[in-house]
Image: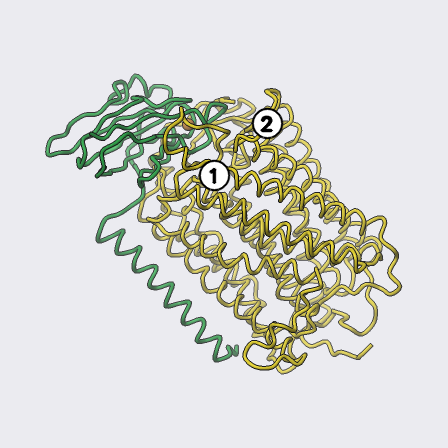
């Protein structure tokens, strides 16, 4: 194997000798990824059942409520699957790049996190299963779920804080051992992702621990609904970047290696992630445009801050395409677009995230529409919004997670991603895209015709307008069925790779790209987390102080608990 | 930090697009006064809504000058009044609150789209230019009857 220098990647044993995870790291990563797949299966089953119910294809037995299934779908996929998968993936890249393995103490924090998250998830699932928490994954007060549900969610969040300690401490350990060197890009990005996560989850933790748990236990009679919603959305928007950033890490750091290219720049990706920390949190009010209790001026201020996400998004698009172009040219791609033909489309580890990148273009444009202060009025709480986040989370992110799984499982199990399984994975990815085209496309269209999200099957007393919705509902049902097929196929492949695939003759490489040799060392200020956390807190205080102060000075009368399901 | 030339051009393109978007929404908001639904006036405690004016008598009230106030209550799982009627071309001020959980009011094919949060009154002003019978529905999950929560708005 050729000798490759560690350019800007100290600690990452890129291409010099076969790398294998420490068995104890393997176990930790496998636990996270494995449970993520369980949540994926549960969430997908709930998803397809509720889709077929809401589009009028099936009639659920009365013992199984539509809104109960919808809660299960949202909680399993948006909160549980994503969090477990992301933390497992981040652990893998951090273990690999920050010295090759985690320390004993780092593993301990990781396991504490795992068990807290697992326990929390099980509590929440029990409450959903007994129909005591059919409040959807946004759990808006004053609908009151069982205390089990809120306690479970708190466990999930607190557990993830413990996992972030693992990542921070691995990063610090590497930095101490390599004074003056620029940090490994993967570990840097993982730290940025967890900083974002820790800052944003403070909002939902306050909502759940200070407001909802005491209230659901009956210690407090009333709840301030506006305050709880604002705390939720302080978290809720950054949540979508918490899903997106790990996909970006794979695009920025892992994919360049898969396409035999180099990372285009060592500084700009870091700057991108810093911008995401700054502009992901002080923007939550754009989920509350149409509601009372928040001053219009501050809604507008947060619109402005939301739009700044255009800049890191443009930077990412440029960097990724530049990496692709350089890789394609270095492999003989000629002319303006010849490089496009040189990319390894037949490698599912590349193809799945590549399809996700393509779908991110309409996804991102839809997001800009939703964030537009006035335009939001047209689409708010319609199926358009559901269509939107099934393109971003459900396509860009999930397709990338498919690619990560096809890469990571063989590395962890020492089994081989055989030709046949690789092609099956390609098929699975395309089935997913086709399903999503029907489902998300139908949702976008029918949303513009006014069909609300989050409703069970209804024709509103045969209101004439619902006639226009019917063909789109059929497309959504068809798409939902295709997507479920793709998930089953994915889980079959994942289980095969995990347990049954032939052992690989050589060690499977964990792909980590290297930075182009003539790139400069990133400026030191990008490594100074305290500065950026300070700026982020400053922006959050600027954007949120006045709305919160208004809620405390003129609090709305609190609401009594309700159980309306 | 070195930013390649083409990337700088691309970023300027992004920044200029961003500024155009912001100027457009800003002008619409602050010189044309187009805002989403809002409301900073408080009501009484949610459970007293139905006994407190004006929500003890939901309905359509003329304000003169071709303006009307539509006082509505969104509750699990119905709207009061169920069939408000307003004249075509009139300026209609909605005032809505909830005695129980969070609801929404949307009128498909119009820009009427409000969140109804217990404890607050949502205000929104709209002019219906076409006569007809409009479907009025709840678009925020409010419980087991959420999908049957509806009304009709008659524009005559
Ligand atoms: Cu409702």
User: Callout 2: 10 Å neighbours few (<14), some, many (20+)?
Assistant: many
Which color scheme does this rendered protein use? by chain
Of all chains in the rendering, the one displayed in green is: B
Q: Colour of chain A?
A: yellow
**Tag 1 secondary structure:** helix
Q: Is mark 1 within 8 Å of ligand 1?
A: no
Q: Which residue is mark 1?
A: A471
The answer to whether residue A488 is left or right of residue B72 is right
Q: Which mark is residue A145?
A: none
The picture quadrant where one finds residue A423 is: bottom right
Quadrant housing the N terminus of chain A:
bottom right
* Distance from the alpha carbon under mark 1 to that under mark 2: 41 Å
Question: Please, which chain is the residue tagged with disc 2 on?
Answer: A
- Which residue is drawn at the image coordinates 45% and 38% (left, top)? A229
Q: Which residue is mark 2?
A: A147
The picture quadrant where one finds residue B104 is: top left
| Residue A84 position in % (x across, y down) | 68, 46
């Amino acid at each position: 194997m050729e000798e490759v220098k560690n350019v800007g990647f100290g600690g990452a044993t890129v291409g010099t000798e076969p790398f294998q995870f420490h068995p104890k790291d393997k176990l930790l990563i496998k636990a996270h990824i494995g449970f993520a797949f369980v949540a994926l299966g549960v969430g997908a089953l709930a998803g397809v059942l509720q889709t077929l119910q809401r589009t009028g294809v099936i009639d659920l037995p009365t013992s199984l409520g539509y809104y109960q299934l919808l809660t299960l779908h949202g909680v399993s996929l948006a909160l549980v699957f994503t969090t477990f998968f992301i933390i497992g993936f981040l652990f893998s890249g951090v273990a690999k790049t920050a010295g090759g393995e985690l320390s004993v103490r780092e593993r301990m924090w990781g396991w504490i996190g795992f068990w807290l998250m697992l326990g929390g998830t099980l509590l929440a699932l029990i409450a959903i299963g007994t129909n005591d928490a059919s409040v959807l994954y946004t759990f808006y007060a004053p609908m009151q779920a069982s205390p089990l549900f809120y306690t479970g969610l708190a466990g999930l969040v607190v557990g993830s804080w413990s996992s972030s300690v693992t990542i921070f401490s691995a990063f610090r350990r590497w930095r101490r051992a390599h004074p003056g060197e620029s940090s490994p890009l993967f570990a840097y990005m993982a730290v940025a992702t967890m900083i974002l996560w820790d800052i944003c989850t403070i909002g939902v933790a306050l909502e759940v621990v200070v407001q909802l748990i005491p209230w659901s236990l009956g210690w407090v009679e009333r709840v301030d609904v506006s305050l709880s919603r604002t705390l939720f959305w302080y978290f809720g928007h950054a949540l979508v970047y918490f899903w997106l950033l790990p996909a970006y890490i794979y695009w920025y750091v892992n994919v360049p290696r898969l396409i035999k290219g180099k990372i285009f720049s060592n500084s700009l990706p870091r700057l991108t992630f810093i911008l995401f920390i700054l502009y992901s949190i002080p923007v939550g009010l754009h989920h509350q445009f149409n509601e009372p209790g928040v001053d219009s001026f501050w809604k507008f201020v947060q619109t402005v801050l939301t739009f700044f996400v255009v800049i890191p998004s443009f930077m990412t698009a440029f960097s990724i395409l530049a990496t692709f172009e350089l890789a394609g040219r270095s492999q003989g791609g000629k002319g303006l677009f010849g490089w496009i033909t040189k990319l390894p489309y037949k490698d599912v580890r590349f193809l799945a995230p590549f399809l996700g990148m393509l779908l991110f273009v309409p996804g991102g444009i839809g997001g800009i529409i939703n964030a537009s202060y006035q335009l939001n009025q047209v689409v708010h709480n319609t199926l358009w919004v559901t269509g939107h986040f099934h393109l971003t989370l459900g396509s860009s992110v999930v397709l990338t997670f498919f690619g990560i799984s096809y890469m990571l499982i063989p590395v962890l199990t020492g089994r081989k991603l055989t030709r046949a399984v690789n092609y099956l994975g390609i098929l699975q990815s395309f089935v997913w895209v086709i399903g999503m085209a029907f489902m998300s496309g139908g949702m976008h269209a029918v949303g513009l015709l006014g069909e609300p999200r989050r409703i069970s099957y209804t024709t509103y007393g045969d209101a004439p307008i619902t006639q226009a919705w019917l063909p789109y509902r059929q497309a959504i049902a068809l798409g939902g069925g295709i997507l479920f097929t793709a998930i089953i196929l994915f889980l079959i492949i994942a289980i095969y790779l995990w347990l049954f695939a032939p052992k690989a003759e050589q060690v499977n490489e964990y792909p980590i790209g290297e930075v182009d040799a003539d790139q400069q060392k990133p400026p030191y200020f990008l490594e100074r987390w305290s500065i950026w956390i300070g700026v982020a807190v400053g922006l959050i205080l600027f954007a949120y102080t006045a709305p919160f102060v208004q809620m405390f000075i003129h609090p709305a009368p609190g609401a009594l608990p309700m159980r309306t399901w | 930090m070195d930013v390649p030339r083409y990337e700088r051009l691309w970023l300027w393109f992004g920044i200029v697009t961003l500024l155009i978007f912001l100027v457009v929404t800003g002008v619409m908001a602050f010189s044309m006064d187009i805002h989403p639904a809002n409301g900073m006036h408080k009501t009484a405690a949610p459970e007293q809504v139905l006994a407190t004016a004006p929500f003890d008598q939901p309905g359509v009230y003329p304000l003169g000058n071709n303006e009307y106030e539509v006082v509505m209550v969104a509750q699990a799982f119905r709207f009061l009044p169920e069939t408000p009627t307003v004249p075509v071309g009139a300026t209609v001020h909605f005032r809505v609150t909830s005695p129980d959980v969070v609801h929404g009011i949307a009128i498909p094919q119009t820009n009427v789209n409000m969140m109804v949060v217990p404890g607050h009154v949502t205000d929104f002003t709209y002019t219906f230019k076409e006569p007809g019978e409009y479907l009025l529905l709840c678009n925020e999950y409010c419980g087991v009857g959420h999908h049957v929560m509806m009304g009709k708005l008659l524009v005559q």
